Amino acid sequence: MSTDPETPDAADGAAEPTPHAAGGEAQATDAPGGTRPKRTRLALWVTAGVVAFALAGWGAVAAGSAVASGAPAPTPTPTATSTPTPTADPGRPAPTAEATTAKIRTCMVGAAATDARLGAMQAHVRNSNTGEVLYDRGGQTASRTASVMKVLTAAAALDVLGPDYRATTTVVRGSEPGSVVLVGGGDLTLSATPSGTQTVYPGAAHLDDLAAQVRAAWDADPANPPLTKLVLDASFFGGDEWHPTWNPLEREQGYMSQITALQVDGDRASPFAETSWRSPDPIGRAGDAFAGALGGIGTIERGTAPADAQTLGTVSSPTVAELVNKSLIVSDNSVAEMLARHVAIRTGTGNDFAAIDAGVREGLDAYGIDTDGITVTDGSGLSDDNAVPPAYLTELFRKIEAREQGLGVIRDGLPVAGVQGSLAYGDRFFGDNAVARGAVWAKTGWIETGYTLSGIIHAQDGTPLTFAIYALGDAPGAIPPSSREAIDTLTTAFFRCGDNLSNG
């Protein structure tokens, strides 16, 4: 389930340059005019060497040059006032600065990384400051992310929509006398509870506020007949309400609503419970709630609003920044899908599930990280068809840690080990792993075929790391719930190693 349950080699240094051999041994040649005994030639060379030594090496340099070229070395004629100028030996390269040797890292995490509960494990770790890859196991392979996908959805929404964007629900005059149209603007947080009540969505708009605006505007015109008909327009979102790859148990068990442009409280049976049963008809439930708040309605039907109809009332959702926080801290699936759908609509790719991939990828392009190979099937990560390489996440989290391009909103909305959100549950970072509490900011993920965790570690040695761990199985239930503990143990091992983490 995409919402996490509430119960729940060191690189070799460059080789030192090897100098070329200085020119070959010199061959003496006879002087013109006849052949001289070998003894005489040898004496001349010895004499030249003695003189050269007495002249502080000048003759030696000249002789060396002659040797390199194969010509006989001339015997120098010194003068009392000359100052010889040394020449470079072309056979010997000039010395260069010693090559820098790559850091040898020695901290291994082999025991933690080979825990059988991790299944087909993929992992990737970078030094967040330098971008250097410290650990890589399948980091370039795109695989299902579970709820870690919400980080990509959030990043795309912040770029495409902006942190202050709000979704608006509107009521307009209907085409028939005595009718109004409730137009869903894709706000899944809109609440049927009384104004002033705080639901699982802080700052949510309330239907009774909207109904009061409509009633006041309607009654202000004495020519209006009594309000008797309510039309429900949910056409802002199109296509299927439930993705075909999602298990319907996610709705029944209270982790996900159907995705409609008109619904209230994320279609929860209880607006105050994060995990709460959801209905098969969120549009109808929202219509019933609004009709009750408005009063006098005898007919409710589905339809669309007339073009250029008079607006009678509007209410707006929390901001994108607030919604991002909600989608990450407690891994709210419905809010993540709401954001993904708005991104698709704003980018012009469409208003259904099929439009999400192109819309979200367009938003991610703003961060300058190659998205080739990424597949975005939904905004929440509930689908097994999502695919993101762990290496993409570690690079994106570098930008999140640096708070680049407004990504500090995500940084502030991440669960923290032992402190807040889905990493503060009793089955996370306990026992020996408690040493990393307060030092891991990461998004959790859980679906039937795997568990994931990706984010930021402030390591024991002070180094900021970015990491991604996937524990995946090839069938539902292949990865046990205790995989979360195995993931936490590997994360804690990264925390202990810091910049000394070895890829060996």
Image (cartoon, rainbow, N blue to C red):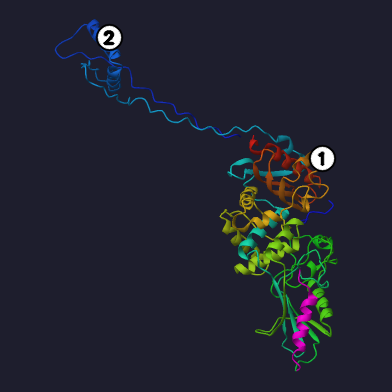
Rendered position, 93 above or below 148: above
Residue for badge 2: 46
Q: Residues within 10 Å of mark 2 (few under 14, many from 20)?
A: few
Q: Amino acid at mark 2?
A: Val
In space, the residues marked 1 and 2 are separated at their CA atoms by: 82 Å
SS of the residue under disc 1: helix
Q: Position of residue 420 (x, y in %)?
A: 77, 52
Residue drawn at the location 26% of the way across and 8% of the way down: 42
* Residue 324 vertical position relative to residue 171 in the rendered view, above or below: above
Q: Which residue is the site of mark 1?
A: 431
Q: Earlier in the sequence, mark 1 or mark 2?
A: 2
Range covered by the magenta-colored residues: 204-222
Q: Is residue 93 left or right of residue 120?
A: left
Q: Nearer the viewer, residue 220 or 370?
A: 220
As drawn, 171 above or below 496: below
**Is the residue marked by circle 1 packed among few (<14), some (14-19), or many (20+) residues within 10 Å?**
few
Residue 386 at least partly seen: no
Q: Position of residue 358 (x, y in %)?
A: 61, 63
